[in-house]
Image (cartoon, rainbow, N blue to C red):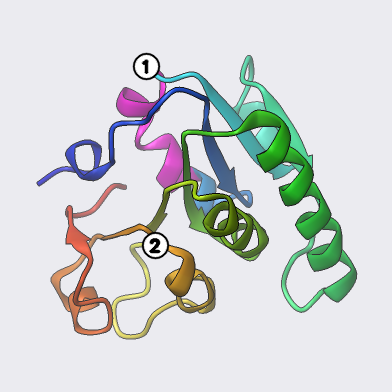
Amino acid sequence: MTASTSLPTPRPGPVLLVSTQGGHLAHLLALRGWWEQQDRLWVCPDTPDVADRLVGERVVASHSPTTRNLPNLLRNARLAVRLLRRERPSLLVSAGAGVAVPFFVGARLLGIPTVFIEVYDRVDTPTMTGRLCGPFTTRRIVQWQSQLAFYPDAHLVGPLL
């Protein structure tokens, strides 16, 4: 099974790709063969890394940092509600990190399917974002057999990077 075949076929509306910079973004970029065929919108922090990697893409800036930052969590929650209502995405896909949480909650409330990709470097324990997004996740993708121990309902696709 590959990551592309594990992703649901989107219904009408853009695919919303939510990420922080760095490795989380790299996981989503690895799915380029899938998402470049979709109408899409990115939610990422306004950093040089993101600007460089998403040249020519439609990007909405999220509030960063997200880790242990309550004001930015609230700002991102407001952004999620506004953006999810305005764009009505067909699907939300994320590999984390913290910015994903309010988007997954909002998507669940609006009946928008979600996909969470657990990152490749957490093989022994789930990520905090993976645990927090879990109750709001429609489909979970993991990259290592060992990750199925804590996500038994996940789709194993193998390493993306």
Name the spot of residue 159 as percent of width and height, x first: 23, 53
User: Under tag 2, what secondary structure?
Assistant: loop
Name the spot of residue 143 as percent of width and height, x first: 24, 60
Amino acid beneath label 2: Val
Classify residue 75 by image quadrant.
bottom right
The magenta stretch spans which residues? 26-37
Amino acid beneath label 1: Gln
Residue 128 within the magenta-colored segment of the rendering: no
Local crowd at mark 2 within 10 Å, few (<14), some, or many (≥20)? many
Classify residue 57 by image quadrant.
top right
Q: Does residue 49 appear in the picture of this structure?
A: no
Circle nearer the viewer, 2 or 1: 1
Examine the residues drawn in magenta and state their main secondary structure: helix
Instruction: Say which residue label 1 marks.
Output: 37
Instruction: Say which residue label 2 marks.
Output: 119
- Tell me the residue at 60%/26% (across/down): 54
- Tell me the residue at 70%/39% (across/down): 85
The alpha-carbon separation of the residues under discs 2 and 1 comes to 23 Å
Classify residue 34 by image quadrant.
top left
For the residues bearing labels 2 and 1, Cβ distance under 8 angstroms: no
User: Under tag 1, what secondary structure?
Assistant: loop
Mark 2 and mark 1 lie on one chain; the one further toward the N terminus is 1
- Tell me the residue at 56%/52% (across/down): 107
Q: How many marks?
A: 2
Name the spot of residue 130 as percent of width and height, x first: 45, 71
Q: Looking at this view, is 9 or 24 the one in front?
A: 9
The answer to whether 22 is drawn above or below residue 74 in the figure is above
In the picture, measured across the screen, residue 11 lies left or right of residue 46, that is left
- Tell me the residue at 21%/71% (across/down): 153
In the picture, measured across the screen, residue 134 lies left or right of residue 61, that is left
